[in-house]
C-alpha cells in the first residue's frame, strides 16, 4: 500500500520520535511511504482565527501537492489536528460546492489545483483498517502481555467528522493494542480533551484537564497517544499537574508506533524513546 | 459567578451580530438544552457557560460576548458540535467570534490574540512552524516575564533533544528582521483579496 505522507510541523521538529517510529512501523508492515513534496503548515487551530477561507486553503495546498504526485495513494497524517484540518476541506466543499472555486482561485497563485481525489487518512485509521490487528499480531516478536496500556484518542481524530471511528467511544486503538498482547486498560477518559493550546494560553485550565486524564489512567503502565499535542500535554507537565492535583501522577506516555515498535522488536534508534519527556523506563523494565 | 440581569425588552438588541457570526442562522434554532455546556471541558472556568453565551449571541449582546473570555477558553475539542441535538456547527461560530474579536481588537485576552497572531506570522513567513521561534515570538509579544514559568519546560525539552541551541541561534536574526518576502506571502495576499471581494 502506498501513502503520501504529510508529517506536519510538530512531527518535523519537537515530535520527531513520532515521525521516525511511524515510518519504521509502516515500513515493517510493508507500506510504501512517500513524503508530500514542499508541504506547508495546515494552519493548526489558528488559521481560522484570521480567515475562514485561509483555514481551507492552507490544507488544500498540501492536498493539491499530493494530487500531482505520481501514482495513487492516500494522504497520510499522524497529527490529529493536521488530520482534522485536511479532512475539513473535503467536508466543507461537500456542504458548499462554491467553495471549490474560491479555494482554487487562491491556489492558482501557486499553480496548484485541488479536486478532492486524494483521501485523507490518520495513522491509526491506516493501522487499524488497512493492515488490521491480524497483520499487526503476525509481526509481534515480543508480546506486550506484561503491560496494561491506556489508549488515549483525544479529540480531533474522532471529532468533528468521525470518519474513521466513533466520536464518543472509539475502539480501533484498543484493537491495535490488543494485537500486541497488551492488556487494554479500561480508560473512561479516552476522548476527553487534553486542553490543546490552552496549555500555553491558559495553563491552569489545561493543567486541570490533564490532571483528570492522568488520574483516570492510574493503574495502567503507560498511556498511548496518536497526536503530538496530546503527547506533549500529557507528558511534559506531569510535575506541574501532580502539584496542582496534590498527588503523584507521573506515568510513561508513548506514541502508538513507539509501542508497536517495541512489540515488533525494532531497533531502538527507530523508536527514539530517549526523547520522551516522561521517562519510559518503567515500561522497558517490565518488558525486560 | 455574578449573574447580570439583562433587559430582554430593550429596543437596542442587535440581531445583526448573530447573522454576521453564523450566516446560515442555524444558531437561531438553539433550544438552550445545555448539552454544549455539559460537554465542555473548560466550561467551569468561563464567566458565561457556552449555553449562556449562545443565548447572548441570539439576543445580540455583542459587547458582552466579545468582552468575555468564554470563547477564548474553547480548546476546540468539538464535543459540543458533535453532540448538539440541533446540529448547529458551534465550533465554526467560535471561530467567527475569535476572528471578530481579533479584527475589532476587542476583549480581555491579549495572550490568546498574541498567540494566534504570532503563529500565523510564522506560517506566512516560513511556510512551516518552528516551534521554538514561534514560542519565543509569542512570549516576547505578551509579557516577557511570562516566559519564566516555561523555563523548566524549555530546559527539559533541550535535554530531550526537542529544541536545539543551534535552532535558537538560527532564529536570532529572524526575530530582528521581519521585513522581506515570506514563503506564503503571495497565497495569504490572494486569500485576503478574495475575502475582500465578498
Image (cartoon, coloured by chain):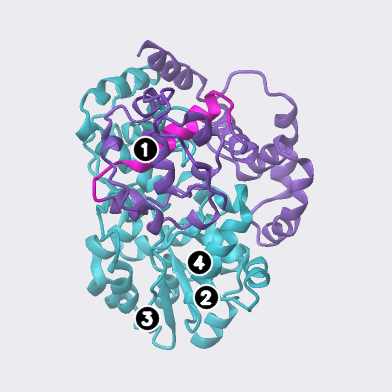
Chain colours: A cyan, B purple
**Residue found at the far top of this picture:** B197
The image position of residue A237, as x and y in percent, is 63, 64
Q: How far apart are marks 2 and 4 (CA)?
A: 27 Å
Label 1 crowding class (10 Å Cα cut-off): few <14, some 14-19, many 20+? some
Q: How far apart are marks 1 and 2 (CA)?
A: 32 Å
Depth order, front residue of A12/B10: B10
Q: Which chain carries label 3?
A: A
Q: Do the residues labelled 3 and 4 touch (CB within 8 Å)?
A: no
Q: Which chain carries label 4?
A: A
Depth order, front residue of A69/B28: B28
Q: Distance between the residues labelled 4 and 1?
A: 38 Å
Residue bearing the label numbered 2: A215
Label 2 crowding class (10 Å Cα cut-off): few <14, some 14-19, many 20+? some
The image position of residue A126, as x and y in percent, is 28, 58
Q: How far apart are marks 2 and 3 (CA)?
A: 32 Å
Residue at the image position 63 percent from the left and 79 percent from the top? A248
Of the numbered discs 3 and 4, the one sitting upstream in the chain is 3
The image position of residue A102, as x and y in percent, is 30, 20
Residues flagged by tags 2 and 3 on a common chain = yes
Q: Residue A141 carries which label?
A: 3
Residue bearing the label numbered 4: A271
Q: How far apart are marks 1 and 3 (CA)?
A: 46 Å
Of the numbered discs 2 and 3, the one sitting upstream in the chain is 3
Dominant secondary structure of the residues highlighted in magenta in the image: helix
Residue at the image position 54 percent from the left and 81 percent from the top? A284
Span colored in magenta: B85-106
Q: Nearer the viewer, mark 2 or mark 3?
A: 2
Of the numbered discs 2 and 4, the one sitting upstream in the chain is 2
Residue bearing the label numbered 1: B92
Q: Nearer the viewer, mark 1 or mark 3?
A: 1
Amino acid at each position: 500500500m502506498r501513502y503520501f505522507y504529510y508529517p506536519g510541523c510538530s512531527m518535523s521538529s519537537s515530535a520527531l520520535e513520532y515521525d521516525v517510529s511511524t515510518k519504521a512501523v509502516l515500513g515493517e508492515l510493508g507500506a510504501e511511504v512517500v513524503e508530500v513534496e514542499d508541504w506547508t503548515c495546515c494552519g493548526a487551530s489558528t488559521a481560522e482565527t484570521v480567515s475562514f477561507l485561509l483555514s481551507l486553503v492552507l490544507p488544500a495546498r498540501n492536498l493539491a501537492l499530493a494530487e500531482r504526485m505520481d501514482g495513487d495513494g492516500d494522504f497520510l497524517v499522524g497529527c490529529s489536528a493536521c488530520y482534522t484540518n485536511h479532512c475539513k476541506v473535503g467536508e466543507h466543499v461537500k456542504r458548499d460546492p462554491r467553495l471549490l472555486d474560491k479555494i482554487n482561485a487562491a491556489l492558482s497563485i501557486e499553480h496548484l489545483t485541488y479536486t478532492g481525489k486524494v483521501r485523507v487518512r490518520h495513522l491509526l485509521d491506516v493501522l487499524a483498517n488497512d493492515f488490521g490487528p491480524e497483520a499487526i499480531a503476525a509481526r509481534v516478536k515480543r508480546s506486550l502481555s506484561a503491560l496494561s496500556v491506556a489508549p488515549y484518542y483525544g479529540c480531533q481524530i474522532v471529532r468533528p467528522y468521525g470518519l474513521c471511528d466513533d466520536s464518543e467511544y472509539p475502539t480501533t486503538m484498543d484493537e491495535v493494542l490488543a494485537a500486541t498482547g497488551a492488556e487494554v486498560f479500561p480508560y473512561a477518559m479516552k476522548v476527553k480533551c487534553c486542553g490543546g493550546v490552552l496549555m500555553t494560553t491558559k495553563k491552569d485550565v489545561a493543567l486541570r484537564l490533564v490532571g483528570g486524564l492522568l488520574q483516570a489512567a492510574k493503574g495502567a503502565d503507560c498511556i498511548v497517544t496518536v497526536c503530538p499535542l496530546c503527547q506533549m500535554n500529557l507528558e511534559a507537565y506531569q510535575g506541574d499537574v501532580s502539584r496542582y492535583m496534590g498527588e503523584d501522577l507521573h506515568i510513561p506516555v508513548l506514541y502508538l508506533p513507539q509501542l508497536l515498535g517495541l512489540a515488533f522488536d525494532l531497533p531502538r534508534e527507530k523508536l527514539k524513546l530517549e526523547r520522551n519527556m516522561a521517562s519510559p523506563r518503567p515500561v522497558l523494565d517490565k518488558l525486560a | 459567578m455574578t449573574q447580570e440581569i439583562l433587559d430582554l425588552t430593550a429596543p437596542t438588541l442587535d440581531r445583526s451580530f448573530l447573522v454576521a457570526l453564523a450566516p446560515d442562522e442555524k444558531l437561531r434554532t438553539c433550544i438552550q438544552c445545555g448539552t454544549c455546556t455539559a460537554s465542555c471541558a473548560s466550561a467551569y472556568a468561563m464567566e458565561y457557560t457556552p449555553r449562556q453565551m449562545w443565548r447572548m449571541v441570539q439576543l445580540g449582546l455583542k459587547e458582552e460576548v466579545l468582552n468575555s473570555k468564554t470563547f477564548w477558553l474553547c480548546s476546540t475539542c468539538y464535543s459540543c458540535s458533535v453532540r448538539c441535538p440541533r446540529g448547529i456547527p458551534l465550533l465554526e461560530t467560535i471561530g467567527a467570534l475569535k476572528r471578530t474579536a481579533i479584527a475589532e481588537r476587542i476583549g480581555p485576552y491579549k495572550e490568546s490574540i498574541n498567540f494566534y497572531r504570532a503563529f500565523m506570522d510564522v506560517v506566512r513567513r516560513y511556510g512551516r512552524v518552528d516551534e521554538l521561534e514561534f514560542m519565543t515570538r509569542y512570549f516576547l509579544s505578551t509579557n516577557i516575564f511570562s516566559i519564566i514559568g516555561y523555563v523548566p519546560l524549555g530546559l527539559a525539552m533541550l535535554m530531550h533533544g526537542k529544541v536545539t541551541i543551534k535552532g535558537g541561534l538560527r532564529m536570532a536574526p529572524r526575530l530582528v528582521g521581519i521585513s522581506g518576502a515570506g514563503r506564503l506571502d503571495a497565497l495569504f495576499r490572494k486569500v485576503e483579496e478574495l475575502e475582500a471581494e465578498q
